[in-house]
Image (cartoon, grey):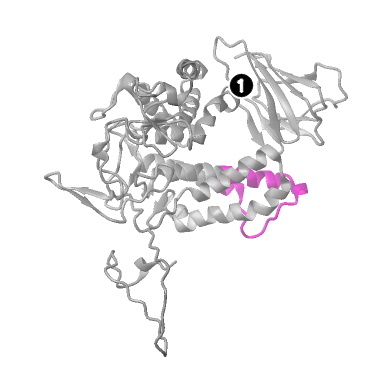
Amino acid sequence: MIPLYRHPLWQGEIDQLRIGLRNSQPGQVVIQALFSQYDTRHNINAQNFIRGCAKYFFWTKDLAFLRANIQRMRTALRFLMHEHQTLARNVVFTDWVGHDGRSGLRIGPEGKKEVLTGQGIGNNYWDLLPFGWFDCYATIQYYDAVRTLAEIEREIKNHPEWNIPDGFLAFNPEELERHAEEVKRTGNQLFWNPTTGRFVACLDRDGQSHDYGYTFLNLEAIHYGFASEEHAKAIMQWITGERTVDGDTSQGADIYHWRFAPRASTRRNVEWYFWAWQSPESIPWGGQVQDGGAVLGFSYHDLSARLKTLGPDNAWERLQEILRWFAEVQAAGGYRKYYDGSRDGSLQGGGTPGGLGMDHEFFESVLVPQIMLYGFLGFAPKGDGFGLDPQLPANWPELSIDRIAFQDLVLQIRATRSFVEMTSSQSDQEPVVLRLPERYTTAKWITECQGPRPEREENGAWRVMFPSGGTLRIESPKQD
């Protein structure tokens, strides 16, 4: 790989190519192929690596995996801090060539379009959109990655028996948490659009912000705890239609035109794209996932954001609409038969373009049902145990989820308003730390078993050894 853009004579394009072999005698050279490529890196890869490793470890407690990868996780975060200047700026700054947030299309005053080859390169899942420079999406992902690694570092510190490598790459978890708060504070100032009441995609090299009403961006900001309480409230007022934004193509109830999820964007975009996406105006509104379309998987972040800001009843109401839609899809014979041209909506996937993403390469559709585990049940895996914080809608007497394969256990968890019950079909080899809200004060086995009595620690957590078939009940005298 030869980074030609670093050459002092580089002017943006190659007109001719000369190859000097410096051979002393005449000869013959066969050139099989020449490849030229623009910079396709994404500025969220390191964040996803850190979070993916952490999630795997939390669910498996694979200490050998953590030993093998902890220094790589630390190096990934230090790369972000250096390459994207996050310690100095408290946001992700991406100045890679072609990744500066500016569009690869330039529209003149008379509507004439100029294609700027090599500009507007995408940085994430939404790869036709030129996020970059001061990048809000990457900053939200960075914020979560910093907090995640802080959690890992604290667990390593609290469990020296794990024998996880330390060294100069290691981070102080308290310092990471303080840095995360600075990232949140700076990001909520820099990326917030007070006129529209939502986060913008980025601020580009020219200082221009780009706001097309990206619901996925704003809902993830709430899901990951990046949005301030005030901003989270404003975002949900906009997405639920409680308030409208002047100039938006989609407003009010139309934001949920597709039923299973909000539109990915609420304002038509025909000018802010990757340079090779040259005719966005030729595709109607809603005909592409990034321009008025929707992706099923990211409805999970909508449900999570509602749960965090509007409560379980509101989240359950939204989920019921998704279930009604899905029942119709199943009755029709599946996604492809449901969206067969007889109704509005076209599916992307399997090589075909479209405005709705839910099958084929859209693996993230599996996210939606996880709202039951992570959301309503409040299950939070940790290296040495798990947390529970049930949030039941008013008309749910209880919630039960079984076959939760957590570390060495296979759990069934039942939550009511006054207690939670946990049963494992396998025995654990060492104690599990259970973290529940303070209202849960009494623990007891309600089945005959050989398990030792659960112990309450000073921090309020419970230390438990799960025998096979034993059911533990932890009660709360204060009901929700």
Residue nearest the viewer, comparing 417 with 124: 124
Question: Mark 1 belongs to which amino acid?
Answer: Pro
**Is residue 170 inside the magenta stretch?**
yes
Q: From the viewer's perspective, is residue 355 above or below residue 99?
A: above
Residue 347 seen in the figure: yes
Residue that badge 1 annotates: 390
Q: Residue furthest right?
A: 450
Q: Position of residue 209 (x, y in %)?
A: 29, 43
Q: Position of residue 235 (x, y in %)?
A: 38, 28
Q: From the viewer's perspective, is residue 1 above or below residue 74?
A: below
Q: Secondary structure at mark 1?
A: loop
Q: Residue furthest bottom?
A: 24
Q: Residue furthest left?
A: 110
Q: Position of residue 93 (x, y in %)?
A: 40, 52
Q: Quadrant of the C terminus?
A: top right
Q: Which residues are magenta?
A: 148-176
Q: From the viewer's perspective, is residue 288 above or below residue 62?
A: above
Q: From the viewer's perspective, is residue 306 above or below residue 216?
A: above
Q: Quadrant of the N terminus?
A: bottom left
